Amino acid sequence: MSIDCDANATYLPEAELQGVIAACLKHLGNPSSLHRGGQRARAALEEARALVRETLGASSGDSVVFTSGATEANNMVVNACARLGARKLVASAIEHPCVLEPLSMAGAHAGADVVLVAPGTGGIVSCAGMAAALTEDTTLVSVMAANNETGVVNPVAEIARTARSRSPQVLTHTDAAQVPGKGELSFRDLGVDFMTVSGHKFGAPSGIGALLIRHGIGISPLILGGPQEAKLRAGTENVFGAAAMAGVLSRVGSGLASRIGAMRGARDHFERLVRQCVPGVIFNGEEHPRLPNTSSVCIPGVRGDDLVVALDLEGVLASSGAACSSGKPGPSHVLRAMGQPLERVKSTIRISFRADVRLGDVERVVAALARVLGRMNRGS
């Protein structure tokens, strides 16, 4: 049986989460229908919306718009802000491509002035760095809550406060897809106008996510058609997905302390063992707060892609970066933005653990890594 060390890509649900998901299979009706089945689906959808709002620390007046995932939600925010006119859009250079690509489109086709702020060498986006890019005509500031490759956690609340003090009309956004189930997350405490989450990052089914919008903020839709989701997202709602995401989100939130402890224990045990058997290993971002399950591992002299394939043959599922970019040529834009030399970037893999990982599994992962490196060294 394979050991899943790619939990930041798709978090395969643990047994108890599978039960939560299975219980939601009854919610398959069309919530726009007037008959009893449709009204039951409508009730389930609104219960899911309220549960997401409560679990993510949003206020009663804040909106929760169900989407197909964080990619759609992030596109919705960037496109809406770009439509406000040829203004300035500021984001960190380590954002996920589903933020960077619509920003690039806004610059090329909407005439927006797009500024990308580089992180420090440890991968954290500083408040000072973001503040230096702000001007009075800044429309949007976007910084991810935690990076999907390094796990480094950014000071989103501080950046949002600073942005608002510099430009009172600015809209603030955070892509928080990596945080639920791995760290504390409160929309209210972050103080942003928009926050996106994605169900499959914390054990819910893929194809469901949510955009949280602060009360009083207007936004134009990305998908046009029917009146669903308060006219912000046309199309028949994914009631099963919304109910499953809300249920899983609530479950992982209620046991968050133990989950964090298990993940951090596994990650730290892994890094201790790797230090003992791999000379010169580097853990990117370890000097900053990180997600408890994430380790960005650089082994100089070894190609990360080759290492991922070799580990797969040993029954260890790892990644050389973001899963959605793994088939795309070119080095990690995150590590490059951190100022790392190309050879170090190419020698990096990502290990990310689930909450149900056992220390024995961690030790088997390290043993597999040692065997693979031994073969690579003999072959070089």
Image (cartoon, helix red, strand yellow):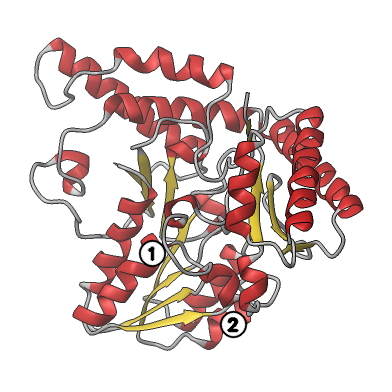
Viewer-closest of 339 and 193: 339
Give the number of the mark in front: 2 or 1. Answer: 1
Name, please, the residue furthest toward the right.
Answer: 276
Q: In this view, does 152 lie to the left or right of 240?
A: right
Please identify the quarter of the rendering in which residue 275 is found. Answer: bottom right
Q: Which residue lies furthest to the front in this view?
A: 379
* Image coordinates for residue 191, horizontal then vertical, percent: 51, 60
Q: Position of residue 132 (x, y in %)?
A: 54, 88
Where is 84 relative to 195, above or below? below
Q: Is residue 313 above or below residue 168?
A: above
Q: Name which of mark 2 and mark 1 comes first in the sequence.
A: 1
Q: In the depicted view, which residue is nearer to us: 216 or 132?
A: 132
Whole-angstrom CA distance, mark 2 to mark 1, is 19 Å
Q: Position of residue 100 (x, y in %)?
A: 39, 69
Q: Name the residue under label 2.
A: 129
Q: Which residue type does callout 1 highlight?
A: Val
Q: In which quarter of the image is residue 37?
A: top left
Q: Is residue 183 visible to the viewer in this orientation of the structure?
A: no
Residue on which disc 1 sits: 99
